[in-house]
Amino acid sequence: MAKTAERERMPVEAGVQKKGKRKVLRAIIAAVSAVLVLFLAAVMFFGMPDMPWDKIEKYEGSTNSYIRDYLEMDISAHRSGAGVAPENTMMAFRRVLENNEKYGVDTYEFDVNITADGELVILHNLTYDKTSDAVEYFGRENVAASEITLAEAKNLNMGENFELNGEYPYRGLRGDDIPDDLRVVTCDEVIDYIEANSNGKKFNYIIEIKSIDENGKRAADKLYSIITERNLKDRVIWATSEIPVSEYMAETYPDMPRSANPDEVIEFFLCSKFGVDLTERDVSYMALHIPYGEKSGYAFVNLGTKRLINYAHKYNIAVQYWTINSEKDVRKLAENGADCVMTDYPDMAHEVVNSMK
């Protein structure tokens, strides 16, 4: 009897186990499906490419001088042309300016930090470590621009770590052997040099403040003074990724064109996705400085679509992209109606855009 009862239970237990396995399998399938749906939704929201019916839209009556006609996209020398010569040095500015038929630059992009004695030096990072022999010279790492005077900074070789075809052509230069155009240069010196040697061409400038906190506000004050003294307000867009500094700039100097800060870029992107009327929002920036391309680190978020650019132009906002170092990305952004690309290789970008006209 016991064996009979056991045999009767076995099919029942087997059936229960099969049902349990099916439930687990269904749960796994449901979970995987949910993940796929969320992934596809995220791709459509953040990275959706242009559709065949997306066209370039032209908005009449734009008052933003940085918005360009189709395929008239500006070429900006990023960090003064970081792939051409040591970044943010007078050597780079001079090389690009003196050979502008080859480079086709319309806009110079560079970064500024304020020194201990209140000068604005051209420097991308807060410290000199990455580009110069600062660690050797000062005997320690992370010497910030704000800690030392301009005179002290002028002792550094700003070409120390510049690489070209696997070589470091300016490494090891010290003291009097450092050429003047590889020493730290100021914002005043760069602008005055370009303006005096432009052969009548009116270049634009994208100037990003890298200093933070109170130093960032001091840098904003100094930069505003430099720009207004030279009557260049209509040819400069200033920028910063530091939210408090950006808010200070917008409040203190509302007459100066500026780019959106990171918070404003996120808000703009979301508004563009949902078709929000920006006239109902307090938008005080004239340009977006945003990344594009797989190498930008933002490949999942597609900020280079026709729809996004059209949306910006509709509200009188120029769209300028960094750091565009591939022919493919330059071509795509030009096709989509971008206003400017900032590139380390302006000669490459110039050739691509010319070939499209």
Image (cartoon, helix red, strand yellow):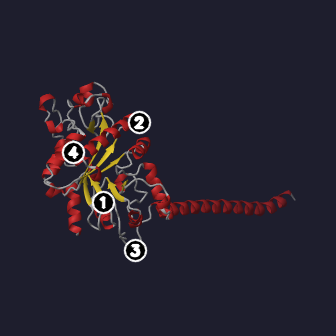
Q: Percent position (x, y) of residue 256? A: 34, 49
- The residue beneath circle 3 is 52
Alpha carbon distance from label 4 to label 2: 25 Å
* Lower sequence index among marks 1 and 2: 1
Residue at 20% over, 65% down? 354
Q: Name the residue furthest top.
A: 139
* Lower sequence index among marks 1 and 4: 1
- The residue beneath circle 1 is 65
Q: Is residue 97 left or right of residue 117?
A: left
* Lower sequence index among marks 3 and 1: 3
Numbered disc 3: secondary structure = loop
Q: Are marks 3 and 1 in contact (CB under 8 Å)?
A: no
Alpha carbon distance from label 1 to label 2: 31 Å
Residue at 21% over, 58% down? 348
Q: Residues within 10 Å of mark 3 (few under 14, many from 20)?
A: few
Q: Percent position (x, y) of residue 50? A: 40, 68
